[in-house]
Image (spheres, rainbow, N blue to C red):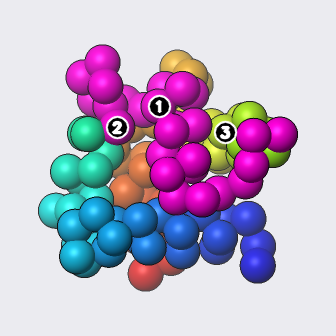
């Protein structure tokens, strides 16, 4: 499974597990729940938690996943992923 496909699949599975569905409303609710400092963006440590909860990577590889995701999604290069960036990835896969 390609890394991006694995990410999307496992995040969707996490949403279904937590909320019973993978709707946009559930995704947004989860995004904001992981945004612990309420900046409206997921920073590296918050994204790391999403990946851990979704079962993506392991302790040794999760940091590389975070770096790759940040490189792909952080459109304004502020070391955080906005809701629009995050939801756009899932929209691409739908």
Disc 3, SS: helix
Instruction: Kindly give the residue lying farthest to the right in the view shown.
Output: 60
Q: Nearer the viewer, residue 13 or 75?
A: 13
Mark 3 or 2, closer to the camera:
2
The residue pinned by badge 2 equals: 34
Q: Which residue is drawn at 31% across and 25% down?
A: 36
Disc 1, SS: helix
- Determine which quarter of the picture holds residue 56: bottom right
Q: In this view, does 88 lie to the left or right of 19?
A: right
Q: Could you tell which of marks 1 and 2 lies nearer the N-terminus?
A: 2
Please provide the residue range marked out in magenta: 34-60
Q: Nearer the viewer, residue 72 or 7?
A: 7
Q: Residue at x 49, y 51 (%)?
A: 53
Work out which quarter of the rendered image holds the C terminus and state it: bottom left
Asked if residue 31 shows in the view, the reply is yes
Give yes or no for contact between labels 3 and 2 (Cβ–Cβ under 8 Å): no
- Determine which quarter of the picture holds residue 61: top right
Crowd rating for badge 1 (residues with CA inside 10 Å; few <14, some 14–19, many 20+): many
The residue pinned by badge 3 equals: 66
Crowd rating for badge 3 (residues with CA inside 10 Å; few <14, some 14–19, many 20+): many
Q: Could you tell which of marks 3 and 2 lies nearer the N-terminus?
A: 2
Where 54 sits versus 48, above or below? below
Give yes or no for contact between labels 1 and 2 (Cβ–Cβ under 8 Å): yes
Instruction: State yes or no: residue 46 in magenta.
Output: yes
Q: Residue at x 22, y 76 (%)?
A: 20
Q: Is residue 6 left or right of residue 15?
A: right
Q: Could you tell which of marks 1 and 3 lies nearer the N-terminus?
A: 1
- The Cα–Cα distance between marks 1 and 2, rounded to whole angstroms, is 6 Å
The residue pinned by badge 1 equals: 46
Query: In this figure, what is the number of numbered marks?
Result: 3
Instruction: State yes or no: residue 73 in magenta.
Output: no
């Amino acid at each position: 499974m390609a890394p991006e496909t694995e990410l999307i699949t496992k995040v969707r599975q996490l949403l279904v597990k937590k909320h019973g569905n993978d709707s946009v409303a559930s995704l947004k609710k989860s995004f904001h729940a992981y945004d612990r400092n309420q900046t409206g963006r997921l920073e590296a440590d918050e994204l790391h938690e999403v990946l851990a909860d979704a079962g993506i990577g392991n302790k040794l590889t999760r940091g590389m996943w975070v770096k790759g995701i940040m490189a792909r999604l952080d459109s304004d290069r502020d070391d955080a992923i906005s809701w629009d960036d995050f939801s756009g990835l899932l929209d691409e896969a739908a």
